[in-house]
Structure formats: structure tokens, C-alpha cells
Amino acid sequence: MVNATKGLFISCDIPMAQFIINLNSSLPASQKFIIHVMDSTHLFVQPHVSEMIRSAIADFRDQNSYEKPN
Amino acid sequence: MPQVRIIAKNFMDMVASLPAMKLDRLYANPFICQAILRSLPPLAKKYVLEMLYIDGPVSAKMLEEWVLADGSSKHRIALDRLIQLRIFTETVDRKKETSYRLNPTFQINLRKHLIDREVLPREPMPSNIVARLPSLEELEAYALGQWECFLLQLINSTQAEKLTNFSSSMMKVFQRGLLSQREKEASRLTESGFQFLLMDTNAQLWYIIREYISNSEERDIDPADLISFLLELSFHITGEAYNMNTLTEIQRHMIKDLADLGLIKLQQGRKESWFIPTKLATNLSVSLTDSSSRKQGFVVVETNFRLYAYSSSKLHCEILRLFSRIEYQLPNLFVGAITKESLYNAFENGITAEQIISFLQQNAHPRVAERIPSVPENVADQIRLWESDLNRVEMTPAHLYDEFPSRDVFEAACDFAREWCGLLWEDSKKMRMVVKAEIHMHMREFLRGQK
């Protein structure tokens, strides 16, 4: 019988995919969210992590910026 | 980012949406017939002129013969437009043949207009009565000043120096859709509000006038009267004075509102008072894509991402603050910089990179306007790159299907998903596929049926 798993399909570039995989491995086993790594640019993850991934990417992005003090 | 765009539709689209009786009344005015003729697509204009002196119906087949084969889509568009505006009436007779004829009121009035050039219901006043007529430049400056003041009040800026005479309920109508109206907090610009600010003046004017007209019914003013007066106004001569006593009661009421928007300048002499249409008014019946009157630009963007805006207008300052960091404010100059943070701020508010770049291009200072491109390539590219940096990851809710009993079932399921345009990923070796969440139900039915 065909098995259906609900989740989130992520499509991105290679560095971002590596970033998400790294984020996944840094979490404790109960919170790991990657169900399958399809290839170097596509992942299948659990459905509720979209916000967490987005905020992690935003933090990563902000680490690189410098705002001139006013 | 969600792409919400407020479309400032053409005036003519609004005219087309009037009920049939009102449209027929409008066509009794020869100026409106002419204005509408001007606004038609070229093929439609040709059809109207050809049919102008034909009294009976013309069969649709004959009309199609006038066009070459590759023009048939334009033919359809023109016909649809003409039927929408009730200029053409379509009849199907017993033999199931369609024929068209021109709206009789429209036809009579356009013919009259062609033969004896109709004179406006009012003449410009002689110059001995009218003293101190403003020059065209002064008039233009006045119009722009009024319009800016109105816009500043619209976006609820505390920087508006003087308030227009619009009642607060009217302002609320205009603000609907542009500002989020919350009871206790200060209202914030919505996404459409930001896009509205970055549009060019003609488009903004259309939006406001459309809101004004749609709201007129609630104030017991017939929108057809408003539309006919506005179209008449576009045939007046800019800069000439027209006596106020030639206006009806309703029109007098309208004139005051139009003065606040900068379309009209009101003046008073010793015995008489008159109004002077500005360029904004006479440009009204020109369609949106015709941007003949380009106002002077004021922004210089340098390759080091610095911005110099030669303007003292508060409105321009507010607009620039939307996406850049204003650093210095001098009497006739704003100095700022386009930074990543200021752009992220803009993107969060729903403004797209294309809108920012086209705003900078359209308002480029004459010194840099001749340069191609007027905004340096590295700045434009960087703005687009920063925008795409926010969209690096695409997430789609989906379902993963595996453990297919046989390859045939797998192939069939893939084809099924492809038909519904929901197939996101398939792996034939491992017999796994990912399908969009929206069609999961259909997939389940299909797979059950496969057993």
C-alpha cells in the first residue's frame, strides 16, 4: 500500500540546503525535522518548521550586516 | 513577497461600467462622444468612423472582412470594447446572423460634432475683466502644490502644513485601501498605500478621481453628471479663465473639491469669480499610457549608492524615506544613501525592487536623465539582488508518496499528478514522489481506485 507522508517541500540553492542540513544536525534527535534529502537542492521536511527555518536564515543574514550608527 | 498591485484603471473603464440608461444620457453630450472616441483602440476608432454614416445594421461577417487574418484578436478586442461601451448594439436575427449598428444617440451627436464644431457651454472671459491671470508656470506650480498638500494629508503625515477642505469622511474614503484604519493606533500605510505613493502623478490622480466618483452616489450626486463635467473640463484651455456663473449648482460644488486636488484654480475679482483649469485637468481624458507631460525629475543616484534629491518638498522626503536612509536635509537638497537595511525595510512593507527602480528612473534629475541608464547599473542590480536574497528558499506544503506496489502504479500516479500540475519531485529509482498538498485528496482517490 502506498504510504503518504505530510510535510514541506523545500527548494533552494546549494549553500542554503547545506545550511538547513547543518541546522538539522545541530538539533537534538527529538527535534530533527528533515525527513528526506532528495538531492543537493531539494529537501523534504516536517511541516511545522517553516517559520523556524526562515528565522534561522534571517539571523544568518543579519550576522553579515553592519548598520552605520546614526 | 505577495504581489498586490492597485491598478489605477482608465477612466473609460469606469465609464463603461455605468448602467445602460446613464450611458445613453452621457452620449447626449457631444464632447463626451469625442472624448470616448479618442480613448478607443485604433481598430475600434476605424469601425466607428466607417459606420458613422451608415444607418442600418451591418452584418458581423462584413466587419470581419475588413480585417486580415492575423488581426482577428485585435478585431475581437475592439468589438468587445465597443459593445461594452454600448456604442455598438449587437442583434441576432432569426437566421442566427449577428449584425451591429451604431448607438443612435452617439451617432447623431458625433455627426453634429463633425459638421459644426461644437462650442463649449462657456467662453473664456475677456482679459479686461480678468486681471492678474497667473502665468502657465505659476499655474503648474500651484497645481503641484495643491496636489502635494492633498497627498501629504492623505498619508496622514503630521508634516502637512495646511489642511485641504475635504471633510474627514471624504479623506477616509480616499484612505480606504491605502491606509490601515485602526481605531486607537495611528494608521499605517498598507502595501497598496506604498505602491500608490510610488506611482506617477497621473496614475495617482486617476485613482483618487475614481474613488471620488464611486463615492458620489452616497452623497446623492449622480456619477454621470460628475463624469460629464470632468470630461468637459478636459476640453477647456489651460490657463484661461471661465466665469463661475456658467456652472450649475452641482458643478459649483464639484469645483470646490477639484480646487483642493489642484485641478482648478479659483480666483475672485471685484464683481465676478472665475475658475482656471490647470494642466492636471486638461490631461484627464488622455489615457494612462500617454505620459506626455513629464514633470521635472529631481533625484540623482550615484554609483556609490548615495542619493541626492534636489527638492524641498516634504512629500518627496517621505517617499524617499520609504526605501533610503536620509542623512542630511538642506534647504533645497536631501542627501541620503540606499542601504541594505533601508531596502529590507521597504521590502517588508511590500514594495518591490522594480517599483523602486522605476520610481528612481522616472524622477531622475535632468542632468542624469539623458544618461542611459539613468540609474547606475550596479545600483539597480544590487537592489534586485538584495530582493532576491530574501527569497532564497521556497517552501511548498506537500506530501511524499513511497512504497508503491509496482512500477506501473508509480508511473500512473506520476502522470496523474502531472495532469493536475502538482508533481514537485519524482525519483524513479526509489519509486518516490512529492506532490503538492492541494491535490492530496485527488491522489488518494486515484490510488484507492488503482487497487
Image: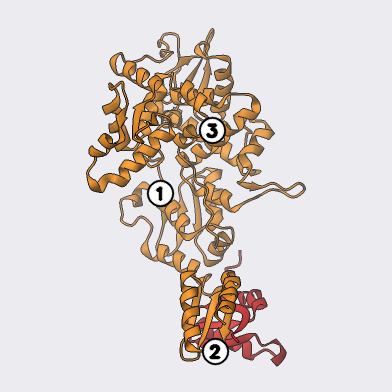
Quadrant the N terminus of chain B occupies:
bottom right
Q: Residue at x 38, y 42 (%)?
A: B289
Residue contact at pointers 2 and 3, CB within 8 angstroms: no
Number of callouts: 3
Amino acid type at circle 3 is: Gln
Q: CA distance from mark 1 to mark 2?
A: 61 Å
Q: Is residue B170 left or right of residue B65?
A: right
Q: Position of residue B282 (x, y in %)?
A: 42, 28
Q: The disc numbered 2 marks a residue on which chain?
A: B
Q: Residue at x 39, y 37 (%)?
A: B81
Q: Name the secondary structure under disc 3.
A: helix
Q: Which chain is red?
A: A
Q: Position of residue B360 (x, y in %)?
A: 43, 53
**Above or below, B130 relative to A18:** above
Q: Is residue A47 left or right of residue B82?
A: right
Q: Is residue B364 visible?
A: no
